[in-house]
Image (cartoon, grey):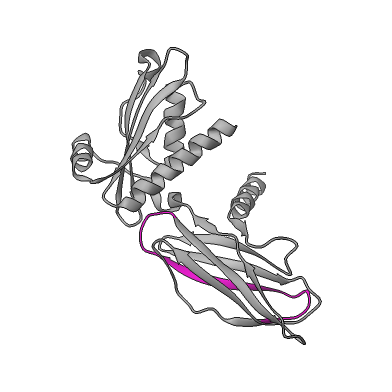
């Protein structure tokens, strides 16, 4: 039973990494499966010719935004009617920030002068794939906090009304470790906590959560992110904002 459960969890994880690139009604259907290996992102793109024509010179053209770099030049393929193929693309990552992969599929239709171009849905690379919880002393945290020049300030905007639960949610959302002794936030009605994480590129990410419970029971305050590079500060801020919004929707 345990083995079956582990297999089920793996399948769920894999499905979460699948991104639909084209619409179901497009003449060419494409979806990508992302695999992250530290400094590399591997895209396995399944491409299906949904027409009854042969498609010549079909090319998957990709481009990147952020510190991402394509490793190969795109190749051209011939697809028979209803044929399916898998195309692999390798992308190098050079820093911890949210990146975007975009592009299109172009092709010629055999027996006619027409050609086609389908714009692909964007693929957003999650900064959480490159961040892991870390451990530093309070003195080292304060020293880095004073030294790092990039700061992003996010307002607390949540439907959570418990300070301890809110801190747990932020820790889970950012994949960071809490350095502050906990246990008094519920009684005091105030929360002040320092969080820390490192990236696979040995970059430091610092977060300070300051919040209080108001008289109407809601939480207010700010989450401040500091780092040596702009990419981490912006990406973590965007992630926290998004996760707070998702919690509101639930």
Spot occupied by residue 56 in the image (x, y as percentages of width and height): 69, 84
Q: In the depicted view, which residue is nearer to us: 12 or 237?
A: 237
Give the quadrant of residue 77: bottom right
Please identify the quadrant where the N terminus is shown.
Answer: top right
- Marker count (numbered): 0
Q: In the depicted view, which residue is nearer to us: 50 or 92?
A: 50
Furthest residue to the right? 52
Question: Is 178 on the left or on the right of 72, as rendered?
Answer: left
In the image, residue 249 above or below residue 211: below
Furthest residue to the bottom? 111
| Whether residue 143 is visible | yes
Q: Residue at x 53, y 70 (%)?
A: 62
In the image, residue 8 above or below residue 38: above
Please identify the quadrant where the C terminus is shown.
Answer: top right
Q: Residue at x 30, y 29 (%)?
A: 180
Spot occupied by residue 174 in the image (x, y as percentages of width and height): 42, 41
In the image, residue 125 above or below residue 54: above
Q: Residue at x 55, y 60 (%)?
A: 34
92 magenta-colored: yes
Give the quadrant of residue 154: top left
Question: Is 84 on the left or on the right of 42, as rendered?
Answer: right
In the image, residue 226 above or below residue 210: below
| Whether residue 175 is visible | no
134 magenta-colored: no
Question: Is 93 on the left or on the right of 2, as rendered?
Answer: left
Spot occupied by residue 71 in the image (x, y as percentages of width and height): 45, 74
Spot occupied by residue 53 in the image (x, y as percentages of width and height): 79, 79
Q: Which region is colored magenta?
A: 78-98
Question: Is 58 on the left or on the right of 221, as rendered?
Answer: right
């Amino acid at each position: 039973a345990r083995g079956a459960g582990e297999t089920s969890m793996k399948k769920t994880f894999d499905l979460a990494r699948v991104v639909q690139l084209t619409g179901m009604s497009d003449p060419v259907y494409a979806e990508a499966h992302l695999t992250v290996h530290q400094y590399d992102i591997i895209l396995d793109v399944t491409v299906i010719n949904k027409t009854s024509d042969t498609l010549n010179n079909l090319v998957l053209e990709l481009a990147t935004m952020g510190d991402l770099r394509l490793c190969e030049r795109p190749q051209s393929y011939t697809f028979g009617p209803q044929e399916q193929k898998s195309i692999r693309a390798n992308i190098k990552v050079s820093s911890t920030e949210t990146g975007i992969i975009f592009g299109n599929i172009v092709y010629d239709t055999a027996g006619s002068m027409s050609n086609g171009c389908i714009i692909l849905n964007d693929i957003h690379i999650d900064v959480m794939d490159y961040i892991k919880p870390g451990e530093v002393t309070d003195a080292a945290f304060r020293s880095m906090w004073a030294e790092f020049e990039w700061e992003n300030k996010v307002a607390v905007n949540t439907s959570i009304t418990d300070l301890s639960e809110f801190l747990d949610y932020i820790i889970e959302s950012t994949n960071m470790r809490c350095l502050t002794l906990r246990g008094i936030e519920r009684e005091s009605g105030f929360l002040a906590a320092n969080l820390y994480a490192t990236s696979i590129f040995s970059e430091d990410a610092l977060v300070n959560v300051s919040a209080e419970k108001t008289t109407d029971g809601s939480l207010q305050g700010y989450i401040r992110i500091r780092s040596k590079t702009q990419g981490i500060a912006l990406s973590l801020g965007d992630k926290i904002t998004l996760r707070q919004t998702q919690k509101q929707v639930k």
